[in-house]
Image: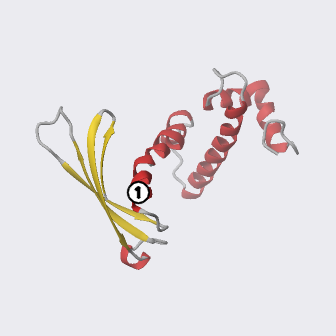
């Protein structure tokens, strides 16, 4: 399937060729299908034309259009969770080297962000509705609010 679209004010042509693949062929668990994505972006700042080639694998079978959309939407992860973990939670600055400790901290950070997203969606003060605002709110009154969050039976701001 071929597609030409405007992406970030640049003309981009993409061609996706899907094919069936097994986990044994890819040496990757739960693979259902794979695809070859050829992309050409018309960039006025570069003198030479460049064709980019990308290989995609998926754990579920999906139509070509959906696979093209999934390739485009993957930046949502980078701009959402990854940004929160790196910039606000300081995951890249962490110096923990023990694999078990690093895994435990990673799970705690992700659970905290899940709670923070619920809090942000219900926050009345839109200026405070950020991950940093959530951390500051939980640190209020010598972390008494954060401690009550994990010990209370029914929180008033979590969904039923």
Above or below: residue 96 compared with residue 7: below
Which residue is drawn at the image coordinates 47% and 72% (left, top)?
Answer: 29
Q: How is the protein colored in the picture?
A: secondary structure
Q: Is residue 149 left or right of residue 96?
A: right
Which of 6/75 is in front? 6
Q: Position of residue 123 (x, y in %)?
A: 71, 28
Q: Position of residue 104 (x, y in %)?
A: 62, 53
User: Which residue position is annotated with label 1?
Assistant: 65
Which residue is drawn at the image coordinates 56% and 52% (left, top)?
Answer: 102
Q: Is residue 115 left or right of residue 156?
A: left
Above or below: residue 23 compared with residue 47: below
Q: Within the image, what quadrant is residue 38 found in?
A: bottom left
Which residue is drawn at the image coordinates 67% and 37% (left, top)?
Answer: 116
Which of 105/32 is in front? 32
- Name the quadrant of the N terminus: bottom left
Label 1 element class? helix
Q: Within the image, what quadrant is residue 141 found in?
A: top right
């Amino acid at each position: 399937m071929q597609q030409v679209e405007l992406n970030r004010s640049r003309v981009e042509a993409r061609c996706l060729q899907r094919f069936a693949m097994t986990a044994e062929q890819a040496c990757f668990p739960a693979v259902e299908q794979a695809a070859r994505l050829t992309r050409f972006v018309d960039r006025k700042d570069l003198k030479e034309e460049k064709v980019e080639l990308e290989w995609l694998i998926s754990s579920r079978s999906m139509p070509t259009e959906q696979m093209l959309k999934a390739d485009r939407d993957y930046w949502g992860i980078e701009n959402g969770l990854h940004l929160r973990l790196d910039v606000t939670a300081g995951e890249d600055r962490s110096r923990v080297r023990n694999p078990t400790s690093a895994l435990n901290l990673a799970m705690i950070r992700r659970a905290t962000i899940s709670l923070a997203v619920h809090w942000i969606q219900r926050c009345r003060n839109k200026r405070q509705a950020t991950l940093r605002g959530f951390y500051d709110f939980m640190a209020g009154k010598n972390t008494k609010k954060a401690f009550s969050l994990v010990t209370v039976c029914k929180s008033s701001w979590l969904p039923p």
